[in-house]
Amino acid sequence: MDQQTPAAEHVAESSAHPTDAQMIQLLTPSGERTAEGGSAPYAKRVAHLDHDALRGLYEDMVLVRRFDDEATALQRQGELGLFPQCLGQEAAQVGSGRALAAQDYVFPSYREHGVAHTRGLDLAQILLQFRGVDHGGWDTEAHNFHLYTLVIGSHALHATGYAMGVQRDGLVGTGDPDRDTAVVAYFGDGSTSQGDVNEALVFAATTNAPVVFFCQNNQWAISEPTTKQSRVPLYRRGDGFGIPGVRVDGNDVLASYAVMDEALERARSGGGPTFVEAFTYRMGAHTTSDDPTRYRSRAEEQSWRERDPIDRLRKHLESEGAWDQGWAEQVAAEADALGEHLRTYVRALEAPPASSMFDTVYASEHGTVTAERAWHAEYEAGFETSEVAR
């Protein structure tokens, strides 16, 4: 495709789902179950999800969106320095996240709030980094969920290396469902243009590493459309590396669950890596410092709002007679409580001592860092002496 493709041409293409018959979809935008063509084998992977499980997925997505809204408001109020929303991507994240086993390990980028929620993370801890008071904010081993990575695509190599270690530790293909382990790297469409991601694909393919590359194609790498990043659908990127690829409707929580379930099964059993492209849309800005009205139209945004993943599941629950208004009110109350928790938590945060910058430079004592710590202590003491002198 010509690299000078105008934005209007991208709008026309991205405002509707692709006609690619290979895209897996189990729930239509109107909330109807479907399993046509290549989607049929995936339907059995969600057959066990009863109405209670579907309501659980709905609740997950509602809470994650409330987190998004509250964090964005806190940034606008000056409580956070920056915040990247996952607005519109809840189904891809919650669906895939709920397919993970406890022993699986996740390497996120910086927008995987829905996945973090499914791993049991208190979402308030995510805001420590965006308030600038902590390098990460949570215990990675407690949730098997690594810290957010702000350097685009670099964590794909970390995930692949970790997966190679899992493989060498004999935690793949044992047949024990509580032992066999998969690793997942979540990233966006823009990351596929980075060298680190392509290098990770090389290593994963040649070592048959148990890793899933989960690409959330939200159509925009900041202000650059996917049409200017690739001549082919992103899921086909895996072909050149010998990695099977699959494109899933990322606004369909059931399809996202099913596709991830298959990819994880392949990884844990020793079948190697999978490249998943979740075709979705970033309904919000890239971050709170971005103005998407400068590069995309309101018509495009509206066409994707009509495919809202939360509304889609609600329609399905209603059509199944599984929507309960009393329960829905409880979910809304839970979301309100989460909002209050986030506001209280963030506003109570205090800046850490400046000396804490030396604490985690190295795992053990280091002479240079020790000397710099001492110099900084003396430097700070100088200000205290000046105050006394006054």
Image (cartoon, rainbow, N blue to C red):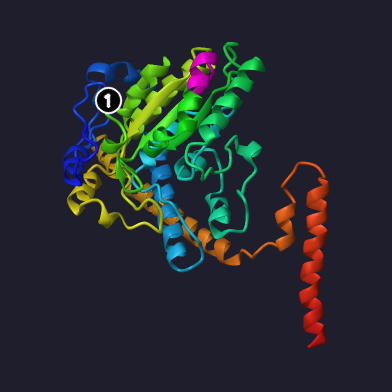
| Nearer to the camera, 92 or 49 | 92
Amino acid type of the residue tagged 1 in the rendering: Met
**Residue 384 to residue 349: above or below:** below
| Nearer to the camera, 146 or 243 | 243
- What's the magenta region? 202-211
292 within the magenta span: no
Label 1 crowd bin: few (<14), some (14–19), many (20+), radius 10 Å:
many
In the rendered structure, the answer to whether residue 12 lies left or right of residue 71 reads left
Residue appearing at x 60%, y 66% in the figure:
348
Q: Secondary structure at mark 1?
A: loop
* Residue lying farthest to the bottom in this orientation: 390
Q: Quadrant of residue 247?
A: top left
Position in image of residue 357 (x %, y %)? 70, 55
Read off the residue under disc 1. Answer: 23
In the rendered structure, the answer to whether residue 16 lies left or right of residue 313 reads left
Secondary structure that dominates the magenta span? helix
Q: Quadrant of residue 46?
A: top left
**Residue 371 to residue 7: above or below:** below
How many numbered discs sit on the rendered protein? 1
**Residue 336 to residue 360: above or below:** below
Quick check: can you spot residue 321? no
| Nearer to the camera, 323 or 202 | 202
| Nearer to the camera, 158 or 128 | 158
In the rendered structure, the answer to whether residue 273 lies left or right of residue 165 reads left
Residue appearing at x 46%, y 42% in the figure:
112
Position in image of residue 171 (x %, y %)? 62, 17
Residue appearing at x 42%, y 63% in the figure:
73
